[in-house]
Image (spheres, helix red, strand yellow):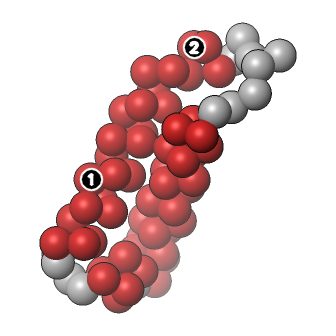
Amino acid sequence: MNKLNFIDWLALVLVIVGGLNWGLVGFFSYDLVAALFGDMSGLSRIVYGLVGLSAIYLLAISPSLSKR
């Protein structure tokens, strides 16, 4: 069984952070990323972009994850 590499772990953490942030938005109308980095500031847009890229990455490698 292969272990997850650093990129796999980073993508997983970012997707979890994104999911928790959307949960906060949905249940409490509170955007944690915007609260930390500013509403649609450059840094918050980078965080949102990295979360989206991480989701695409995990989607692409998900077949191989089930074999690890």
Can I make out residue 47 in this image? yes
Amino acid type at circle 2 is Pro
Percent of width and height locating residue 23: 49, 67
Q: Whole-Å distance between the Cαs marked 1 and 2? A: 23 Å
Image quarter (top left, top right, bottom left or bottom right) of the N terminus: top right
Q: Which mark is residue 68?
A: none
Q: Secondary structure at mark 2?
A: helix
| Residue nearest the viewer, comparing 1 with 19 | 1
Q: Is residue 49 above or below residue 9?
A: below
Residue 6, above or below 57 = below
Residue positioned 49% across, 31% down in the render:
58
The crowd level at tag 2 (other Cα within 10 Å; few <14, some 14-19, many 20+) is: few
Is 17 placed above or below 35 here?
A: above
Q: Is residue 28 left or right of residue 45?
A: right
The 10 Å Cα crowd at callout 1, few under 14, some 14 to 19, many 20 or more, is few
Indicate the position of residue 48 as horizontal and vertical percent values: 30, 59
Which picture quadrant has residue 53? top left
Front residue of 43 and 34: 43
With 45 as the anchor, is 58 left or right in this view?
Answer: right
Location of the C terminus (image quadrant): top right
Q: Label 1 amino acid?
A: Gly
Q: Are marks 1 and 2 in contact (CB under 8 Å)?
A: no
Provide the residue designation for mark 1. 49
Q: Residue furthest right?
A: 1
Label number found at residue 63:
2
Element class at badge 1? helix
Instruction: Please tell me in which quadrant of the rendered image residue 30 appears.
Output: bottom left
